[in-house]
Structure formats: C-alpha cells, structure tokens
C-alpha cells in the first residue's frame, strides 16, 4: 500500500490488528477499543515513510552515528518551531526519553539524594529515581479554576538539601498543561535558589493544540537556567513513530554534558539508523502533516470535552497539548474507573499508575469515528450503572 493512502486523512487509518503492537494486542479477540498507551492510530507522515523506504532500499544497515543533515534538521526544527537556537554539540543522542531521564537520575547527585517531581505524572517518572538509588519526593499538582498548576509554597517546602534533581514534564502528561513563562520562571528560580539540576521532558512539545499557549522550553528562558538543564525531546509523539526509538537530550553546559555522557557509557546504545532517518525527515519535512494533525486533534479534544461534560460524575480539564484527556471520575462513585470502562468496552489508562487514583486517561489520537464510539460506550456504561 502506498504511503500516500492515509496521507493527511486522519479519518482513515491502517488496521493495527494485522500487525503486532501493544495497544491493540492487549485486547486481542475482545470487543474493547484501546484508548490507552500514548501512540496514535494514524500512519506516520508520508515524508517519513518515504525516507524510510529510500534508506531500506539501500540494503546496508551498518553502524551509523548522527550525520550533519540530521543534526541540522533538528537544530533548525527546534529554532523554527520553538524559537530556541541550540548548538549542535549540545545534542546527546538517545534511544528513548525514558532512558534519557533515567540517565539524568544517575548523572546528578549521588546515591540517597532526592529527586523531586509533581504528580500525577507519566508513570516512569515515579520509578526512575529508585532505579539509580535516589529517593523520589513528590507533591501534587493542584486544580484551580479548571486548570492544573503548582502549589508554589508546598513545592518549596518539599525541597531539602538532599534534593538535587527536579523532573519536569512539559507539556504535561497526563494533565495536558503547557506551562507558561511565569510558571517556568518560578521553577527556574526555585532551581537556582536550591542549586537543582532540571530534567525537562518535552517529548510532547510538538503537540500544542492552541496558539494561545505556546511551548516554551524551560532552558530557552535564559542562560542561567540553560546551564542547569537537561532537555529531552523526540519526534516520537508528534509524528507517531515511538517504536523507531530515537530521541535526544539537549545539554548546553559542558560539564553537565560530560557527566551525562559518562553515566551512559557502556549501557546506552545509539538510536537505530531507521529512527534517525525518520527523525531527520520529520523535523525537516513533517511540518505540514503536523499542522493538519493538530487541527484534527483540536476537533477531537473538543468532542471529548463536550461528551465528558454530559457524563454523570465525570469532569475533564481541557488539554492545551497532547492527545490525552485526563478525566476525573471521583464524583461518579465508581471505585475502579479504568476497570469499569474496560468492562464497558473502552480501554483507558488507570490514573493510579500516574499517582492519582480515581482518574482515567483517554487517548484521543484516533479517527473521530472511533472516538465517538469510545465516548458512546463510556456514556452507556455510566447510564447502565445508574439504572442498575
Ligand atoms: C512524558 C513522556 N515521556 C516519555 C515517554 C516515552 O518516551 P520514549 O518512548 O522515548 O522512552 C512518554 C510516552 O508516553 C511520555 O508521555
């Protein structure tokens, strides 16, 4: 099938049940719509698929370091899309962002030191510190006027002399916030006052849904914060190529970069060559596809907001980025909402894994017809539990 078959037509998607995969594999043979793990149903952009075909057709897939054209595409893409001019030698190539923040935990401080993060958050944030014998310190994000944000005094009080690393997720999975300049400047100031290194996971930065809330890389605020920051990015979420395993850290400070590379030695492989080929194509030529995608996701987001507002006992905050909706089910009285909706035919992510039971995360990176069906199943499950 030609890569153009599904080009820019987000209503039509390949049948994922014909290939192995985590998302659909979990519910193989059962009538449950998978709307959980964070990848989308859409085929990757034609520019990416074409580049992969060209590279595979060469036939030789030998060891390959990042090449100048790849580095240039990433450097120019970040300048164009996020207004941040990085230097090529700040880049450290990685096979994934989870690897990237686990390495950050190893590279900063020592055994027994503390790593701060705010919850709910992408589950591997919660386990990374212990992987390198660090202690996780967490405080909740707070909901005010329908928007998740920081309780600044509470965060400040959690930082101790043993806290060395602040793990930030921006744009945020699962609450969908794009933190603004004021919030980022406060976090940067906090880091400065307590001499914290910042590890900023910005994997969702290409998926900002509203022009009113642009993504600001925290390291782009000023040179002082850049010096203490490890920024993690990847093409994987935006262009839907997560299993190609290619990501990178941006570390402006030479000494921090040296420590980071040292922590990688002998255990972290290069990204694979196809991931790097796809990355170059995505950053260089993936712009029009991304714009069309964001337009489509915006429509899906609005549909989710409208549907959830009509569901008894459920509320959702409006995601400013990502294709993930974070839904509060606590007022419904349902004890295990993810299991409840799964029984109703929709596979969602359980908030408990993110550190906040009573919530579910719904992945709306799918054709609108599938989204409508999933939302209708949720509505029916709620109605039947009320009438039962
Ligand atoms: C915030 C965040 N970081 C990292 C990842 C995964 O990154 P990778 O597959 O590159 O390890 C995800 C995937 O959902 C994510 O949401």
Image: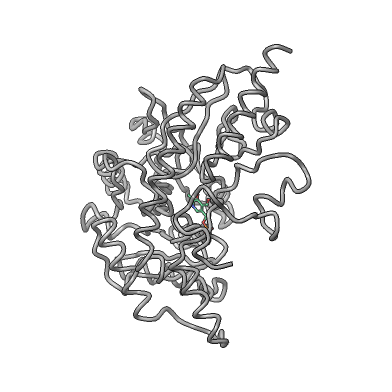
Residue drawn at point x = 48 percent, y = 22 percent: 309
- Residue 188 shown left or right of residue 41 in the figure: left
Numbered-mark total: 0
Residue drawn at point x = 46 percent, y = 62 percent: 45
Note whether 359 is above or below 77 in the view shown: above
- Residue 227 shown left or right of residue 137 in the figure: left
Residue drawn at point x = 56 percent, y = 45 percent: 123
Residue 2: x percent and y percent?
54, 68
Picture quarter with the N terminus: bottom right
Residue 356: x percent and y percent?
55, 32
Residue 333: x percent and y percent?
63, 17
Residue 281 visible? The answer is: yes
Which color mode does the image show? one colour
Residue 102 visible? The answer is: no
Residue ranking furthest to the right: 29
Please tell me which residue lies in front, 105 or 284.
Answer: 284
Q: Quadrant of residue 73?
A: bottom left
Picture quarter with the C terminus: top right
Please tell me which residue lies in front, 240 or 113.
Answer: 240
Note whether 333 is above or below 90 in the view shown: above
Please tell me which residue lies in front, 133 or 19.
Answer: 19
Note whether 198 is above or below 329 in the view shown: below
Q: Quadrant of residue 251?
A: bottom left
């Amino acid at each position: 099938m030609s890569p153009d078959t599904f080009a820019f037509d987000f209503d039509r998607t390949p049948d994922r049940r014909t290939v192995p995969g985590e998302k659909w594999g979990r519910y193989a043979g059962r009538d449950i719509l998978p709307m959980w793990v964070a990848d989308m149903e859409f085929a990757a952009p034609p520019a990416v698929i074409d580049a992969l075909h060209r590279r595979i057709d060469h036939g030789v897939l030998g060891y390959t370091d990042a090449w100048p054209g790849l580095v240039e595409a990433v450097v120019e893409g970040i300048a164009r899309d996020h207004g941040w001019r990085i230097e090529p030698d700040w880049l450290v190539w990685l096979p994934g962002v989870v690897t990237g923040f686990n390495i950050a935990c190893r590279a900063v401080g020592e055994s027994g030191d503390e790593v701060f993060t705010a919850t709910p958050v992408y589950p591997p944030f919660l386990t990374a510190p212990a992987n390198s014998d660090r202690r996780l310190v967490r405080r909740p994000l707070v909901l005010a006027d329908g928007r998740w944000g920081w309780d600044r005094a509470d965060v400040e009080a959690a930082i101790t002399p043993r806290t060395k690393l602040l793990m930030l997720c921006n744009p945020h999975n699962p609450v969908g916030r794009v933190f603004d300049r004021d919030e980022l400047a406060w976090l940067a100031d906090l880091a400065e006052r307590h001499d914290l290194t910042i590890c900023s996971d910005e994997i969702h930065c290409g998926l900002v849904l509203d022009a009113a809330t642009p993504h600001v890389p925290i390291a782009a605020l000023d040179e002082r914060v850049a010096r203490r920051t490890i920024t993690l990015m990847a093409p994987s979420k935006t262009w839907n190529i997560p299993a190609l395993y290619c990501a990178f850290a941006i570390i402006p400070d030479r000494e921090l970069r040296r420590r980071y590379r040292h922590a990688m030695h002998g255990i972290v492989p290069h990204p694979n060559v196809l991931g790097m080929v796809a990355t170059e194509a995505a950053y260089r030529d993936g712009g029009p596809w991304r714009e069309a995608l964001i337009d489509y996701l915006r429509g899906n987001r609005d549909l989710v907001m409208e549907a959830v507002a009509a569901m008894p006992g459920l509320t959702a905050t409006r995601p400013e980025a990502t294709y993930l909706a974070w839904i509060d089910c606590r007022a419904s009285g349902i004890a295990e909402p993810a299991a409840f909706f799964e029984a109703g035919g929709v596979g969602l992510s359980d908030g408990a894994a993110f550190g906040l039971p009573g919530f579910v995360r719904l992945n709306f990176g799918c054709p609108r017809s599938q989204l409508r069906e999933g939302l209708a199943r949720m509505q029916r499950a709620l109605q039947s539990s009320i009438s039962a």
